[in-house]
Image (cartoon, rainbow, N blue to C red):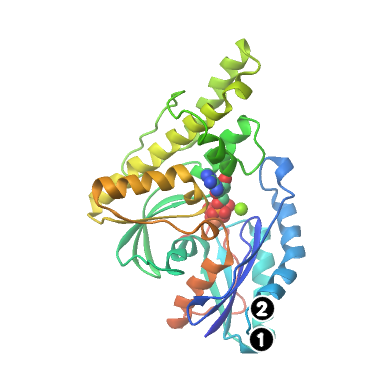
Amino acid sequence: INILAIESSCDETSAAVISDGKILNNIIATQSVHENYGGVVPELASRAHQQHLIPVVHEAIATSGITKEELSAVAFTKGPGLMGSLLVGVSFAKSFAYALDVPLIDVNHMQAHILAHFIDDPKPTFPFICLTVSGGHTQLVLVKDHLDMEVIGETLDDAVGEAFDKTAKLLGLPYPGGPLMDKYAKLGNPNAFQFPISDMPGLSYSFSGIKTAVLYFLRDQLKSNPNFIDENLHDLCSSVQYTLIKMLVQKLKKAVSLHKIRQVAIAGGVSANSGLRAELEQLSKKHGWKVFIPKFEYCTDNAAMIAMAAHYKYLKGEFCDLDVVPEARMKI
Ligand code: ATP
Ligand code: MG
Ligand code: FE
């Protein structure tokens, strides 16, 4: 079984080929046009996907050693994501599958972030709990099978990736601020400044408060010292990151004890964060959890994870029709 998979939900255009469950490549074109805007500009993202998609698909097929005539199916991200961005990928996938006369497979992007754990060994066994942390989502997911997942907790407002990016923006860092925050956090003191830790009921998260707390804190400090940010950048990054990780871990621990499942994975863009990765290793040592941390290239958006999800859907014969439409707010 050879499947070509396409990811275009946000600002990464990506294509990958999977053969009998083995990922052959993972071509990613990252859009740099958004850097100057402090966030992804949807219209620019759609246009960039339009530009990048054909070259990216071409490269994925050319480097796979498989000809397009040997493809068994074409898969794409159906949602969630930006409607215009999704449309570019969906439209291409439909026409390509139609031209090759092979089935079409629609993939849920958030399921795929989790299924990235099945690309390489060691693989988690079922059931496990996955903390999915990305630019648009923060979810605690009970994973019962490859395609059977239940959201047991999520954010009531902002996603944690958004909190990283927005606080980084307040510190004058370019978009996406998360990776830079991570880099500077390593050089600072996590206890230099205190920010409030939100505690929502049950397994719910809230990340909108920290943005406001940082905004007011900086405003007050800048009044007496206009160079406050420059002089304290590393400590600020370290303290904000520490607070965000603390909030993530608080509910993760609660989910583990509630469901009595001690196999724990993290997924999504923010799972690339070195502080969160280190914290998970600590929890593994301290509580005997079996933890799964994805390779860096499979944390942020990529088509390999879409291909992995498509592989499991192919095995179950779960295909979609040519009149399928994207779903910007698709649920797991
Ligand atoms: P979603 O998956 O919810 O639709 P998305 O696809 O935009 O959203 P991803 O590509 O999975 O999200 O992740 C991007 C997010 O990950 C951004 O918010 C980015 O700042 C964050 N991120 C990436 N690397 C790091 C890091 N090392 N530390 C913190 N955040 C990071
Ligand atoms: Mg992105
Ligand atoms: Fe994503």
State the residue position of label 2: 61
Name the residue type under label 1: Thr
The residue positioned 62% from the left and 13% from the top of the image is 225
The residue positioned 42% from the left and 27% from the top of the image is 196
Vertical comparison of 271 with 57: above or below: above
**From the Cβ of disc 2, is ligand 2 less than 8 Å away?**
no
Q: Secondary structure at mark 2?
A: helix
The residue positioned 47% from the left and 78% from the top of the image is 21
Vertical comparison of 264 with 325: above or below: above
In the rendered image, residue 329, in percent from the top left (x then y), is placed at: 54, 57
Vertical comparison of 66 with 28: above or below: below
Whether residue 261 sits left or right of residue 124 in the image: it is left
Q: Which residue reaches farthest top?
A: 224
Decide if residue 155 is in sight here. Answer: no
Q: Earlier in the sequence, mark 1 or mark 2?
A: 2
Count the marks: 2
Disc 1 crowd rating (10 Å Cα; few below 14, some 14-19, many 20+) is few
In the rendered image, residue 296, in percent from the top left (x then y), is placed at: 52, 56
Between 279 and 76, the one lying in front of the other is: 279
**From the Cβ of disc 1, is ligand 3 less than 8 Å away?**
no
State the residue position of label 1: 67
Q: Residue 71 is drawn in which quadrant?
A: bottom right
Q: Verify CB contact (< 8 Å) between mark 1 and mark 2.
A: yes
In the rendered image, residue 236, in percent from the top left (x then y), is placed at: 53, 28
Disc 2 crowd rating (10 Å Cα; few below 14, some 14-19, many 20+) is many
Q: Secondary structure at mark 1?
A: loop
In the rendered image, residue 44, in percent from the top left (x then y), is placed at: 74, 53
Decide if residue 52 is in sight here. Answer: yes
Name the residue type under label 2: Ile
Q: Ligand 3: which quarter?
A: bottom right
> Gap in Å between the C-alphas at discs 1 and 2?
7 Å
